[in-house]
Amino acid sequence: MKRILAAALVCAVSVFADWHQFPVIGEGMGEAKIAVYQSRQGDSIQKSPAMDYFRLRYSPIANLELLSESSLKTGANHTLGARYQIIPAMLSAGVNIGVPIPKTNWNFTPHIQFSTPVTSALTLGSFARVTINTEDANDYTRGIDFRAGIELDLKVGQKSILWVGGDVGKGLTKSERDGDDISRKEENRGLGIYPACGYLVVLGNLSLGTLTFLSFGEDAGNDPLNTTLGVSASVKF
């Protein structure tokens, strides 16, 4: 009985939280999400597209989730992915594939996710992933990148969630161009730290959220730091 209650709690909270930190969606269910961001570096506001990304996920069979993601970020690949729920409500693993649209190279991102209830109202979610790139048409191969994160979701009332968390990211290997190594600092691929917090409200099948995150790490291109505000909306079907 305790295991069933724990599974129900994690699945309920995962409706509100970011997908890659929480369990696979239920069989036969789908969800679409759109997010918009605005960043500021020091005193200057960074110009960004109106739609930062659009994600769509669907579970054709139990424990399996398929993903499609499009982004208007400069040079971003279209992403297709799949992940499988290894341990119900706790552990999943999968891989995302960056399709060369509009870029000219493929990339592969194996990832793992772990989540668990802490109390009846508090849930922990986490993830870790590495991204491996292939060579593009200009004889350039980006190095392997690592990213991991953790999030705590606090349920307040029946329709809202407060969350706090953070990611860390770093280039594990140097990029190469024409056989020569490129400094990770030169490419802003050094250590970056990204604390974040947000609020989400659920209105039937519609979820609306806001978020704020900071970006630290000069070697990751954050000098002295970047701040980002965002809003998101998702709908289940």
Image (cartoon, rainbow, N blue to C red):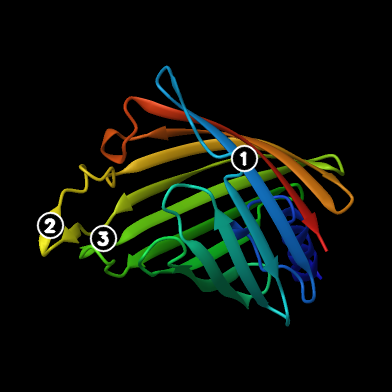
Would you place residue 153 above or below residue 146 in this image?
above
- Dividing the picture into quarters, in which one does residue 32 lie? bottom right
Q: CA distance from mark 2 to mark 3?
A: 9 Å
Q: Read off the residue under disc 1.
A: 36
Binning the other alpha carbons within 10 Å of mark 2 as few (below 14), some (14 to 19) or many (20 upward) gives some
- Dividing the picture into quarters, in which one does residue 175 lie? bottom left
Q: CA distance from mark 2 to mark 1?
A: 35 Å
- Dividing the picture into quarters, in which one does residue 49 lie? top right
Question: Counting residues from the N terminus, which is met first, the one under dot 2 or under dot 1?
Answer: 1
- Residue type, label 1: Val
Q: Residue at x 55, y 42 (%)?
A: 165
- Residue type, label 2: Asp
Q: What's the mark number on residue 143?
A: 3
Count of number-bearing discs: 3
* Depth order, front residue of 80/3: 80
Q: What's the mark number on residue 14?
A: none
Binning the other alpha carbons within 10 Å of mark 1 as few (below 14), some (14 to 19) or many (20 upward) gives some
Binning the other alpha carbons within 10 Å of mark 3 as few (below 14), some (14 to 19) or many (20 upward) gives many
The residue tagged with tag 3: helix, strand or loop? loop
Q: What's the mark number on residue 181?
A: 2
The residue tagged with tag 2: helix, strand or loop? strand
Q: Residue at x 61, y 45 (%)?
A: 152
* Depth order, front residue of 62/13: 62
> Do we see residue 102 in this rendering?
yes
In the picture, measured across the screen, residue 1 lies left or right of residue 82, that is: right
* Depth order, front residue of 168/188: 188
Q: CA distance from mark 3 to mark 1?
A: 28 Å
In the picture, measured across the screen, residue 43 lies left or right of residue 236, that is: left
Question: Counting residues from the N terminus, which is met first, the one under dot 3 or under dot 1?
Answer: 1
Would you place residue 199 above or below residue 132 in this image?
above
- Taking the view exactly as shown, the residue that stands out farthest to the right is 204
